[in-house]
Image: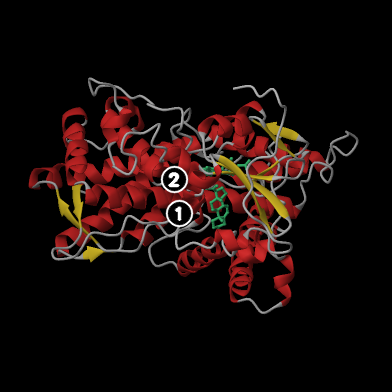
Amino acid sequence: KMSRRGPQEPPHLPALPVIGSLLSLRSPHPPHVHFKELQQKYGQTYSLMMGSHSVIIVNQHTHAKEVLLKKGKTFAGRPRTVTTDILTRDGKDIAFGDYSATWRFHRKIVHGALCMFGEGSASIEKIICAEAQSLCAVLSEAAAAGLALDLSPELTRAVTNVVCSLCFNSTYCRGDPEFEGMLHYSQGIVDTVAKDSLVDIFPWLQIFPNANLHLLKQCVSVRDKLLQKKYDEHKADYSDHVQRDLLDALVRAKRSAENNNTAEISAESVGLSEDHLLMTVGDIFGAGVETTTTVLKWAITYLIHYPQVQRCIQEELDSKVGGDRSPQLSDRGSLPYLEATIREVLRIRPVAPLLIPHVALSDTSIGDFAVRKGTRVIINLWSLHHDEREWRNPELFDPGRFLNSEGTGLTIPSPSYLPFGAGLRVCLGEALAKMELFLFLSWILQRFTLSVPPGHSLPSLEGKFGVVLQPVKYKVHAIYLNASMRISISV
Ligand code: HEM
Ligand code: PLO
């Protein structure tokens, strides 16, 4: 509807000087759930103050698409926060870096490097399948011994090795101390980045001893040492003739810019400093590991809650792939139920329920609402994915909603579905993540049925909110699907 009155202010939560709307934001629920509830009082799009920053919360898909797509460039900014500045050396990365020529340049290099490893070449498929194979070997061992297993570290290692191959052309073995250290620092970062919003609302709280910030700084310094080591190794045996991985692609871009200092694009001017390079790899590495692992954990958690869905996928695998060979990427088109299940997992438990905050780069509007330059915009993907007007019974886990009426093909039943975001800031790893989710889940479910150990209660479906929404820790009992399969495709 067009308003004749022209742009107006969005409904506003009560705000006090200095602390902003903090008093209205106290809730036993995580922020994405609380922001969804506040719609009842303030409407689908409303604003609030976080300290001195004006923030608009968007809870509906029409406004979300206006921000991300129609006015994508206007809303392509990112805020600077205390915690992300620590993680990214003041925004010298892609995900938390503000919109700039440097940001565009880094996105382009990474995009190109990811395409090179992408579906066109067989290499990424080979890498993922090798990791799926070792993951299934670990599950086999546990199944044979009748042991229950926390799958989290196993899934993390498999996914880490895929990203490690991509970024650094290397992998980790089970029990490698460097890998164990990585598990620890990465969880520390996920738990603290962008989470202790108090610190981000009041930068001056930094001067007080703060356990979270201390933990974050410690974890970031461990991560940075690892990144620096990989970078030094690559610099030492770099060759113009072979490009082994993403880090080689970045080093090459840096060198060619440096040798080209007559041109207007010098290495410094496009932001190819060592810091930028390290932070970009850190982003891809961090995003590559935490997101995909989290989705795999949610998928398994839901499959344990809904054994009939698990059985349906296994029947589909049995009839379309059989037991004589392992699934491959070319099977994706013939396994719609598995694809629908992956889509439903990404709907019901979005990895990034609030995306990453966007910032308006100039005065603009959302619908009829005026938005001033510098305003932060939070897209509440949780509201979009649980909107009762768009989804029947949104809390129900039902892969069938992504299938056509015959159950033979895939659909997206609502425009209110954006698991990877959209527009200029759309996820860079969508294609990679989908390949991994498909291959890991199909390999596991072709061989095993997953459940909780006998007598254990089902794991909670409530997530733990942080920079990614993670499921709780629990143990999984894996049993072989059947004896003949164990012989034919045993690992
Ligand atoms: C950004 C989702 C996997 C790299 C994002 C955003 C979402 C998202 C919602 C934020 C968009 C915005 O702020 O508007 C996911 C999901 C994944 C996944 C659901 C897994 C299923 C990956 C992987 C990689 C990756 C595997 C790396 C290879 C990135 C990067 C950004 C991003 C670099 C920042 C883009 C920018 O700010 O320009 N992702 N992601 N993601 N993702 Fe992913
Ligand atoms: C995960 C912990 C790592 O140690 C550092 C890191 C880098 C990039 C972040 C990622 C973390 C969490 C998930 C993020 C990703 C960039 C894009 C992705 C925020 C903090 C999502 C889902 O938006």
**Where in the figure is residue 200, as x and y percent of width and height?**
66, 62
Q: Quadrant of ligand 1?
A: top right
Residue at x 73%, y 41% (from the top left corner): 99
Determine if residue 237 is in view.
no
Hey, what amino acid is under mark 2? Pro
Residue at x 37%, y 26% (from the top left corner): 413
Residue 242 relative to residue 314: left or right? right
Residue 52 found in image quarter: bottom right
Hey, what amino acid is under mark 1? Leu
**Ligand 1 is within 8 Å of the C-beta of the residue at disc 2:** yes
User: Across the whole image, how many numbered discs are drawn on residues?
Assistant: 2
Furthest residue to the left? Answer: 483
Determine if residue 27 is in view.
yes
Label 1, label 2: how far apart the Cα atoms are: 7 Å
Seen in the picture, residue 414 relative to 344 is either above or below; the reply is above
Residue 34 relative to residue 106: left or right? left
- Of the pair 8 and 364, the residue shown nearer to us: 8
- Of the pair 144 and 258, the residue shown nearer to us: 144
Furthest residue to the top? Answer: 406
**Where in the figure is residue 60, as x and y percent of width and height?**
51, 35
How crowded is the residue under tag 1: few (<14 C-alpha within 10 Å), some, or many (20+)? many
Residue 320 found in image quarter: top left
Residue at x 53%, y 63% (from the top left corner): 26
**Where in the figure is residue 260, as x and y percent of width and height?**
84, 37
Residue 89 found in image quarter: bottom right
Label 2: which residue?
Answer: 350
Label 1: which residue?
Answer: 469
Please, what secondary structure does the residue beneath circle 1 have?
Answer: loop
Along the polypeptide, which appears first: circle 1 or circle 2? 2
